[in-house]
Image (tube, rainbow, N blue to C red):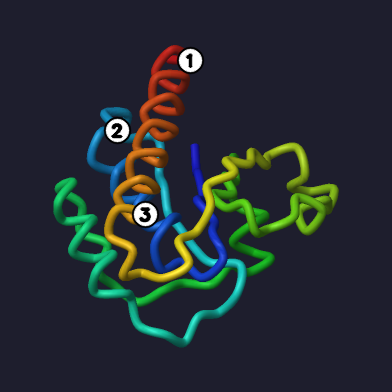
């Protein structure tokens, strides 16, 4: 099974979900990755990277952008954003694969408590997903 976590730029939310899922997942048949809907040119926010480390997560790396081929090759696409409309994903070959987690973005990466709140919300959703997938075995 292939799962893709998507947020706006792949600078924070989708990266948190990918790294955390990889950390807790025990089923090696499940492969996860993350990408942004829009190509981002800004580097990762240092505060967000630091906040992720507080939770034992390393989100360093270059942001990735979605492609049609990438989307087609997924079994499940999870949009981790409240700022991406689901209608973008209404193409026949992947519309039934899309789940939306309406996780808001922080207005500024310097909002340390806002970052932590988002991380906690994503961890909870990933835990729920992981438990659901474990039940399918």
Count up the numbered dots.
Answer: 3
Q: Quadrant of residue 29?
A: top left
Disc nearer the start of the sequence (2/3): 2
State how far apart marks 3 and 1 are (Cα): 34 Å
Q: Residues within 10 Å of mark 2 (few under 14, many from 20)?
A: some
Q: Is residue 106 above or below residue 46?
A: above
Name the residue located 31 percent from the left edge and 35 percent from the top edge.
28
Name the residue located 26 percent from the left edge and 28 percent from the top edge.
26
Mark 3, residue position:
114
What element does badge 3 sit on?
Answer: helix
The reply to whether discs 3 and 1 touch (Cβ–Cβ < 8 Å) is no
Q: In the rendered view, does 102 fall on the left or right side of 17? A: right
Where residue 44 sits in the image (x, y, percent)? 33, 76
State how far apart marks 2 and 3 are (Cα): 26 Å
Q: Residues within 10 Å of mark 1 (few under 14, many from 20)?
A: few
Disc nearer the start of the sequence (3/1): 3
Disc nearer the start of the sequence (1/2): 2
Q: In the rendered view, does 102 fall on the left or right side of 20? A: right
Residue nearest the viewer, comparing 127 with 32: 127
Residue nearest the viewer, comparing 10 with 73: 10
Q: Is residue 47 above or below residue 26?
A: below
What element does badge 1 sit on?
Answer: loop
Q: In the rendered view, does 105 fall on the left or right side of 21? A: right
Name the residue located 22 percent from the left edge and 58 percent from the top edge.
51
Mark 1, residue position:
136
The reply to whether discs 1 and 2 touch (Cβ–Cβ < 8 Å) is no
For discs 2 and 3, the disc positioned in front in the rendered view: 3
Q: Quadrant of residue 126?
A: top left
What element does badge 2 sit on?
Answer: loop
């Amino acid at each position: 099974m292939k799962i893709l976590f998507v947020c706006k730029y792949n600078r924070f939310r989708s990266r948190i979900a990918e790294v955390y899922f990889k950390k807790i997942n025990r089923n090696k048949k499940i492969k996860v990755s993350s990408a942004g809907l829009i190509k981002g040119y800004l580097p990762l926010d240092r505060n967000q990277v630091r906040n992720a480390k507080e939770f034992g997560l390393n989100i360093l790396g270059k942001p990735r952008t979605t492609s049609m081929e990438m989307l087609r090759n997924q079994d499940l696409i999870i949009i981790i954003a409240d700022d991406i409309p689901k209608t973008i994903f209404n193409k026949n070959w992947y519309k039934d694969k899309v789940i939306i987690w309406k996780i808001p973005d922080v207005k500024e990466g310097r909002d340390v408590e806002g970052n932590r709140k988002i991380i906690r919300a994503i961890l909870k959703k990933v835990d729920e997903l992981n438990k659901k997938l474990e039940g399918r075995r």
